[in-house]
Image (cartoon, coloured by chain):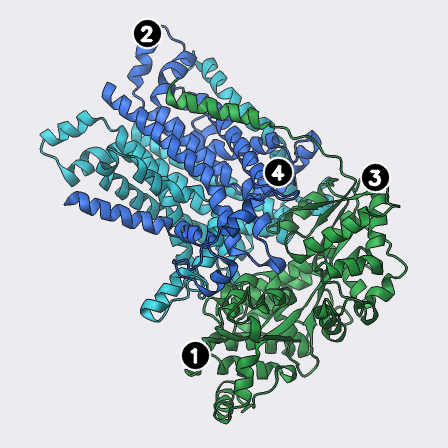
Amino acid sequence: MKPATRFTAALAGSVFAAGLWAGAANAEVTVLGWPGGPEETALRAAADAYNAKDDVSEENKVELLFFNRDGFWDKLQADLAAGSDAFDLNLLATYSIGRYAPFMEPVELSDGAQALYGDAVLSTMQFDGKQYGVPTDLSLHFMYYRKDLIDALMSDDDAKARYAEISKEHLGTALEPKNPDDWTWDDYAATALYFTKAVNPDSPTRYGTVLQMKNLLFNIMVWQSTARSYGGDWMDADGKITVDSEAFRKGLELYKTLYDAGATPRDSLSYEFAEANAAYAAGQVAAMVQWNAAAADLTDAEKSPAVGEVTATIAPPTGPEARATHIHGLGLGLNKSAENKEGAKAFLKWLSTEEAALIYARAGGAPALSAEAVSEVAEERPDLVQLGEYAGAYGYVMNGGASANALAIYELQAKEFTGYWSGQQDLDTALANVEKGMADLLK
Amino acid sequence: MLNAIRWAVFALAALAMNFPLIVTLVTSFKSAREISTNPGLWINAPTLENYATVLTVSDRLNIFLYLANSFAVAAMGTLLAVALALPAAYAIVRGRFGEKTLLPLIVNLRAVPLVIFAIPIYMMFQFLGLLDTRFGLGLVMTIVNIPLVLIILVNAISDVPFEIDEAAMIDGVSRTGILFKIVGPVCRPAIVTSMIFGFITAWNEFLFGLMLTTSKAVPVTVGASFFFAASGGGVQWGVAAAVMMVGALPPMLLGLFMYRKISGTMMAGAVKG
Amino acid sequence: MQTTHRLEWTLLATPLMAFLLVCLGFPAIVNLIYSVSDISFETLRSPELSGFGNFAAVLTDSGFWLANWFSLRFGLLTAILECLIGLGLAVFLAPLFKERSWPIAILMLPLMVAPALMGLMYRLVLHEFAGPVPHYLWAWFGNSPAFLGPNSAFWTLIVVETLQWTPFAFLLFHMAYQAIPEELREAASIDGATGFARFWRIELPLMLPTLAAALLIRFIDGFRVFDNVYVLTGSGAGGSTTSLSIYIYEAFFKQAAIGKAVAASVILFAASFAVLYGLNRLARRRRR
């Protein structure tokens, strides 16, 4: 045979050898979970415990299906819209619940669910007043900061004087270093500027903070607690859009000031979760607002040798109106086209019991539980105590943040606000564009 | 002297174009700890940990299945595309068949983001039971490959002197016969080139792999990110690098192997002259 | 001759046409209906015809025109750069490849990596603290530029795309160069044409069809760029790196504006058909 022909034959052979059709598997109750990370480990543990129970029949056992994270929500959208029955239960998130609710069915929780989670957490899985899912994990933000640097600053009078000078020059008022738990956003900004080499050549770190400013909806979630703590909201009680407000301006200007002063890495406009963590873990950043999910890695001396031992976490800074952290929940809900609805409902009901929640928590998940329930696992998971506490005291969802078009609104804000931060448009234009777009999306 | 400059230019080009690959290779041997502390190209404590993670088969993750899927799908998408495009290219060039409309229409398919076909194809596949099958994904890869393969083949057949056809016609060979016995063999380098590109394109496709598969027919581009997603949307760079190297290896070996075949055939052709 | 052989030509082209009709006929019709419908993910199976509102929405959206502008610049610049470098390498380095093929294999390597993964690796490579490029720049020069800042992102993306796809153009030119009959070169040498003159007068004209094909393919691929840009900068600060593919993808999935996304694609398809049709006619007129 001629070389090319032989190659062709080899290719053709392999097509058939590999088999073009794969057989269909018969799943019992198929659950599409959030892949990778502690959520997966925890769900596995919960599913194993459920399957081991005597009263769960063979055809109602739970089988887990995991897909990848890149494009997860887009694929789920296509699956649900086309009426896929490849899974009975699937992942839901607060910000996307409105988009997926038309393809899902409301679910019934266990009797103890209300006492177990509390109304605020249950509401992260509600749409139009109906419960669409069992909350499994809660996400919110922490202020991560370098204890060693802040302590040094607070105990050095020369440094304090320099700090006052810098804050006077950049922020208009001379400030005094404070404990991060007492920070306002101005204190945070002053600290960020003080620890920036471009502003203060003696700074031990290259940057005072790291902001995630890539045009991405999740970055707006991280940012929006600034506006919230100045009293900002998407809409007022009457449904009037209130984005063009002093509160939003304050929050947006804060980021702009820090970015323009060089207090955050110069590529911040392309930064998201991973980049910000890498910058912080390199030991070149003094403080940042970041998702609670980063805590495990950033406080671990093995994984982050430069900062692991000196990193502390606290709730984000206070504003004149509130101290606030964005919260959203992940959870599991019922696919309208599910093949085994009864089995799926039974699993969901069990998943919302205290027994299941504790198994889930012990296996590494991050459920937000009431103070009473969390005390059972407080020893193994002290971070869950903090999580529940912050969620209860500071957690908020913007008015409209769980509406049908919430995702599109976040996308819109991401585009317009990053346009302002990068200097392509002014603040008035950005806010006007957002108001106009939101009026269409919230119709 | 000139050859020394040539080698220098080659080295420079190879280094620049392959730089991300070199970094990837280096990163794949670093531990998570080292990645966060040592960004340089030197590895202080090489580890095979990342490769162990990638190559370990579990009930959820099976890199070998993803590789086999990608291989089957890319092979089908390549062979079918060439089989369909070769006769059509011949008709387009020699018969001027559809030169004005068919050719631009098909070439156009490459310019349009195929994402717009995602939903209708999804629904069609659902109806036909082709979701999450290699055959279904192979069909889509064929569509993806046809425009490029067609351009290359049309270009190649245009270069074949018309006298060759005429001589054969006088000998009474049919059009189809000419295509397979004469034009096909003469265009073999182009056919193999289009196969290489088609295979690579299909191997690297992501969007349809994502949309149309869930577990059994997952290709390696989609399967890759199963491994390295860390909690909260982070990335485990070391594992990502290892999975990239593993995923790029088959097309690399194939490209090398195919390339030697092409140069072989061309040199043989040159000798026959 | 053309009329008598019409049937034979048709038969040869039939398998391809039939395949595309079967596989894309239904999706194409569905899309055409969607483009003139009020459509959302909830009403995929029952679109409501609503006229040409989607087309109007696309054509009056400044984002659509900015995306076109980005794609056009990106496609043209990368196609020209890739073809120039690829052609230069293929011709200048040709003597190296006479005896051995491994150097070619090395130059082909970047093609083997999925652009999405390539983009992901550049996120690491260019990271100020974790990436080797800024690391060495800081170590040697005490500074490193913003690679993905608002002013530099476009050029960084151009470089990333060019470095990965120059090998594609290179390979096509290498094939074409090798296919030039040795006698022609010898004849040219006898006439006294050597080096650059030989290239300019003999070899380049012979490679023109390949040059046109390479430019066309690379332009199309650059124009519809998606994966690596999407991974590196997304749609960019303020939407500054939104290619047309990203525009359509985001309209489709992020804004759930299916009608608008499909209408934009129909416009793109019609426009590029017109361009290709025109180019084709032009080329044939020149040939005559």
Q: Which residue is mark 4?
A: C32
Position of B84 relative to A324 (above/below)? above
Amino acid found under the numbered disc labelled 3: Glu
Nearer to us in this view, B207 or A307: A307
Q: CA distance from mark 2 to mark 3?
A: 74 Å
The answer to whether dots 2 and 1 both sit on one chain is no
Which residue lies under the disc numbered 3?
Answer: A58
| Horizontal arrangement in the rendering, residue A362 relative to residue B54 (left or right) | right
Residue drawn at x 75%, y 73% is: A389
Please state which of the two labelled residues, at mark 2 or mark 3, is closer to the viewer: 3
**Label 2: which residue?**
B170
According to the picture, the residue beneath numbered tag 1 turns out to be A197
C41, C277: nearer the viewer: C41
Q: Which chain is green?
A: A
Left or right of A113 in this view: B129: left
Amino acid on which disc 1 is placed:
Lys
Task: Residue A91: tell me if it is visible.
Answer: no
**Label 2 residue SS:** helix
- The answer to whether B206 is drawn above or below residue B185 in the figure is below
- Can residue C99 be seen from the camera position used here? yes
Vertical placement of residue C195 versus A141, above or below: above
